[in-house]
Image (cartoon, rainbow, N blue to C red):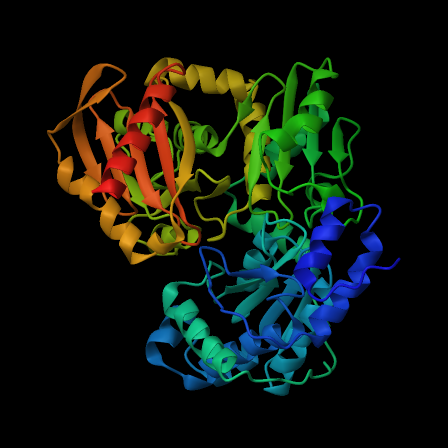
Amino acid sequence: MTTIYTDAASCWKAILSDVEKNRGLLAEIERFCRENKEPATIVFGTSGWRGEIGSDYTFNNVRIVTTAIIRMFRSADPLVMKALGVPNFDEIKRRGAIVGHDNRFLGREFAMEVIGLLQQEGIRTWYGGEAPTPEFSAGIEMTGAACSINLTPSHNPANYAGFKFNPADGGPAGSEITSRIEEEANRMMKEKVILNGTRSGAIGELDLPSLYLDYLRERKTIDLDRILSFIRSRDFAICIDNVHGSTRGRVQRILGEHKNIGYLRTADDQLFGGVAPEPSEKNMAGVEDALKKSPAPLKLGVIMDPDGDRIRFSDGREQIPMNYFGAMALHFLHVHKGFPGVVAKSVGTSNLVNAIAGQLGITVRETRVGFKNFRPYMVEGAPERAIVVFEESDGISGYHHTLEKDALFGLLLAIEMMAVTGRNLSEYLKEIMDEFGSYYPDRSGISVDRSLVGEPLVRKLSMLREKFPVGSTITIGGEKRTVRDLITVDGTKLVFDDGSWLMVRPSGTEPKVRFYIEARTEEGKKAVFETAERLTREALAA
């Protein structure tokens, strides 16, 4: 008996329960995408609007968001134009927009809808095809385009699609832009506007991989010649897991084919084999198995998410999360390559980088969660130019590189580290920790009542900063710790006299409180976690 699905959510549930058996149900998802005219609430989070394909993310709703962007262009609001980096609508039409997508279901079809609407307004368009996020950023700068629209939900599961907008500097759109898009799109949603599709005309196509390679050679943050020399002359093994995403084939375009560089999950699979396509510890299993089979003295393995803006590392002995790799990147770029500047990190990242920066005389800037918050330290002419910027959720960029996080940059930097130091990543990390101290970060959280989401939860948790000012004491694992620093740029972060810390912040989208902690020993993490949860529950009960 054939099941009749009345909504996309139940259809997706069936598909994801057995992706091989139910792959044919994608035809039903396409039907929902075309026929479903129900409005959605548009929220551009830390990295664009995301929604379930066929439920929130439909052809009509993508047309509405695109139309909201066009209306924002036409408004010529001075604050918006300043944030866009383009003086007026005529200049936007002339310089144009790059449009593309990752490997999600109906990616090209959604992109053609966007292109058709832009062309209808006389805006020049380029189709970037399936491409990773950093290529859109580099492509904007290399072509002088006014903006890009990249249809990707990053590392979300296969039932999600997304909508990233990047202005003329190639970075993530700031709130000056996204709030205007949300306002106009949600106004149309409230009015239940129905928009017809517009057939696209002649479309210019961009070779984004070539533009990205030109960008790398122009910027010179990465020494490609040094990397290529290493690949030609050294005994090594590199394993790259593309998780079926848009980074497939990109490394080959940069480094060429090589017998010692292997690739996993390169098939075209919009359902990612049924896994959540994120660079998680669990998803690194295939990479680590491949590295353990190699006798090469130098080994590197990475996994990159579908749109190529997140990356996790391993050398077969140890996984290197971004908390550690970001600190290693600062040390390498400053000590080995001589780059000057500051280091910028999201507030929930490891303080290993603080210890390194403190001894090297480098200023540390801690920002709210979200890569867009690094813009002040990445733009040309910034008074405090960053050597490296990173966040604990696997995103990184560096000096004179893209304002977007870039997994390809992370991979190339790791190879250059091996080439220059002659060490595996875990060996290099041990040397750094031997010199600057050991730090053990982690994160967790608890669920809260849905009625608390938003301002009520923020208000209750803010009591922590009032209760524990600098100089106050907290008992952690039976020992008294003094609060050495209080950081409130995103939630409440208490840094203690031994360098350990805990941070409590509400989730922006879910009924949850998130804990970020760091201990000075692996065994000490449990006590810091317990303290973070205890303090949170006390604040919620007050």
Residue at 61% in and 68% down = 98
Residue 92 coordinates in the image, percent (x, y) = 51, 79
**Above or below: residue 323 compared with residue 205:** above
Q: Nearer the viewer, residue 2 or 299?
A: 2
Residue at 38% in and 75% down = 80
Q: Is residue 18 left or right of residue 406?
A: right
Q: Nearer the viewer, residue 502 or 399?
A: 502
Residue at 46% in and 59% down = 172
Q: Nearer the viewer, residue 496 or 266?
A: 496
Q: Quadrant of the N terminus?
A: bottom right
Residue 289 coordinates in the image, percent (x, y) = 71, 21
Q: Residue furthest left?
A: 471
Residue at 77% in and 32% down = 258
Residue 226 coordinates in the image, percent (x, y) = 60, 32
The quarter of the displayed image where residue 435 is located: top left
Instruction: Tell me, yes or no, if residue 373 can be seen here.
Output: yes
**Above or below: residue 420 compared with residue 153:** above
Give the number of callouts: 0
Residue 251 coordinates in the image, percent (x, y) = 69, 41
